[in-house]
Image (cartoon, coloured by chain):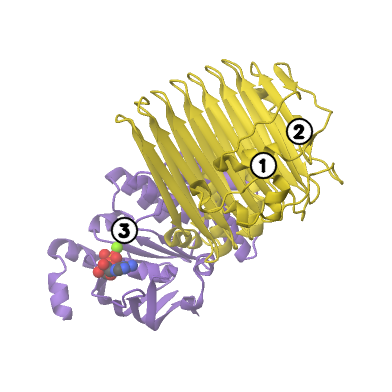
Chain colours: A yellow, B purple
Amino acid sequence: MQKTQAEEALGMELPTRRVESFHYTDLRTMLREIPDNASGSTGGNYAPLVDTHLLSFNDGKLADDQVLPKGVTLSTDVAKATSSDINDAIVGMNAVTSGDAISLVIEGNATMEKPLGLGHFSSNESRNACYHKVLIKAGSEAQVISRHTSKDGVASLANTVTEIELEKDAVANWFVIQQESISANRLARINVSLAENAKLNLFILNAGGKLVRQEVKVDVAGEGAHVDIKGVNLIGDDAHIDVTTVLDHNVPNTTANELFRNVVAGNGHGVFQGQIKVAQIAQKTDAQMACNTLLLTDDGDFSAKPELEIFADDVLCAHGATVTDIDDDHLFYLRARGIKEKTARGLLIKAFVDEVVEEIGVSEELEEAFIGIIDSWLDKNA
Amino acid sequence: MLEIKNLHVRIAEDETEILKGLDLTVKAGEVAAIMGPNGAGKSTLSYVLAGKEDYEVTEGEILFNGENILDMEVDERAASGVFLAFQYPMEIPGVATMNFLKAAMNAQRKARDEAEYTTPEFIKKVKAASADLSIDFNMLKRALNVGFSGGEKKRAEILQMALLEPTLCVLDETDSGLDIDALKIVSDGVNALRDPERAFLVITHYQRLLDHIVPDTVHVLYNGRIIKTGDKSLALHLEENGYADIIAAAA
Ligand SMILES: Nc1ncnc2c1ncn2[C@@H]1O[C@H](COP(=O)(O)OP(=O)(O)O)[C@@H](O)[C@H]1O
Ligand SMILES: [Mg+2]
């Protein structure tokens, strides 16, 4: 097969739909051409959503005005991870694309008052890739907002690889807020490993971007560990948004709960692949996964592929995926009280996704900020 | 106030005719009871008044204050004063009852060119109305009807009616699922709204509701038509003798 411009530029092969994990997102075809490596910002910097201890990355470069709270240690002396496995293409691309790598060690609860912010901004049609390696020390609890933005109308290609290690009893409250411009592409991978009794609370909000793929791989490696993943994917215009998660339960007595709510408008294409693997020794695993989609248009679609690979016999695992339109009876009830059809639809769509945000249990300020992003997306698209 | 003439209605999906030439007139200030066996078409009538799209009107008209409401959208009918207390109120996950009430009240006010309520005004009104109906105010912070008991749902319907102040109130089996105490509370709530400018269509199976909400007229709906009209003594007659003789006489 002749190499594409992208493959030439990256010096690697990109996965096609024949690679199972890329079945719904043929990266090779969708990214035949990619822009050059970023060479610095051409105007504009990251603008934060809420007040955070901020590390901002403009076109992949860490700005040097960071003020970090006690208990958070930053290092820039880190090598990016890499992989030659075609399933890890995003990690491979990250390694060969320009952009800064950092490591953070978080100890204590200093980020619970005011979160740590990892703010990303792309200013032009170039590609950048950041790498974040985070260690949350035993018994510590961290709160991090990883947010991804770009200048209106630019066709940037951003890549983020994040590796989070949770020691015993550590808790990560991690929020991925993706608000790229509708012309920007973004590829991302989060790898998490959990030691004994560690807890991952991950929230993913996709509210922008053209081609977006967010991969999450969790190694549940300590007994008593818990994984909670909640997500809202708002897919409009010509966006193709893919969230692919893999939970690996490798020890007994762990729990996981995964819930995604998606809204498809315009010509949006959504993908959710949720894999739960339970190793033979991982008895008493309790893993639940649900993916519900509101399809508001005939021109869009959503593909959901839940996958259970279970080798232990004493487990509780379940998954459910639904794709529906707005319930006519609900709509009728609201309209019968005098609410106009458009407003009533808006209320129902908003209720469908807000429920997830309310369930993540964050500060009022964060909840309002997240709901604000959803509201403005719905205003424009639904 | 309400004039239904020769109304024929079928189910849009399978074209089964449910209402087969129904005539009914209700005057302002009147409480009209509609009684009839299961499947007679009572709920169908209430849905057609509210404008549900599953039903198709093939003949006849419905005049409300002289206007044909069949030409109006569902929300326009509501804003013009039509209110249906549902037999089975919908559970709507994620929509907080308070937000819903505010959206509904202000949408109707806006449609009538009235000023929208401010939040304090709104809360004051809801607190007063819910106290009258013995509704725990905290319940209204929850999603609309979600996890409400059968009785709570019916009370929430009457609360909406009290807050929206419609001029035509259609109550579809509001008494079902209510115990004696709740029945009394709900009936008192309805009676408090009785007004020379407001009409009620009270659909029920049982005389017991009509002991509390005393009707001016009683109509028997059977097989898609009103087959007999009388005063409140007709309800007592039905309670004692059932529908058989009236159905036989109409045949
Ligand atoms: N949406 C519908 N789809 C199919 N059948 C319906 C529908 N609504 C009503 N029906 C049928 O129409 C008849 C009248 O129903 P309904 O109006 O609910 O009666 P009532 O309220 O008097 O018990 C019944 O036979 C019922 O099964
Ligand atoms: Mg009925």
Mark 1 crowdedness (10 Å alpha carbons): few <14, some 14-19, many ≥20 = many
| Comes first in the chain, label 1 or label 2 | 1
Judged left or right of residue A60, residue B28 is: left
- x and y percentages locating residue A155 in the rendered image: 75, 54
What chain does mark 1 sit on? Answer: A
Residue at image mark 3: B173
The C terminus of chain A - image quarter: bottom right
What's the residue at 84%, 28% (across, down)? Answer: A65
Q: What's the residue at 51%, 20% (across, down)?
A: A195
Between marks 1 and 2, how big is the CA–CA gap?
14 Å
Residue B239 in the image, given as x and y percentages of width and height:
18, 61
Determine the quadrant in which ligand 1 lies: bottom left
Q: Name the residue under label 2.
A: A100
Q: Do the residues labelled 3 and 1 touch (CB within 8 Å)?
A: no
Examine the rendered structure and indicate whether residue A56 appears above or below residue B102: above
- Which of these two is toward me, A92 or A307? A92
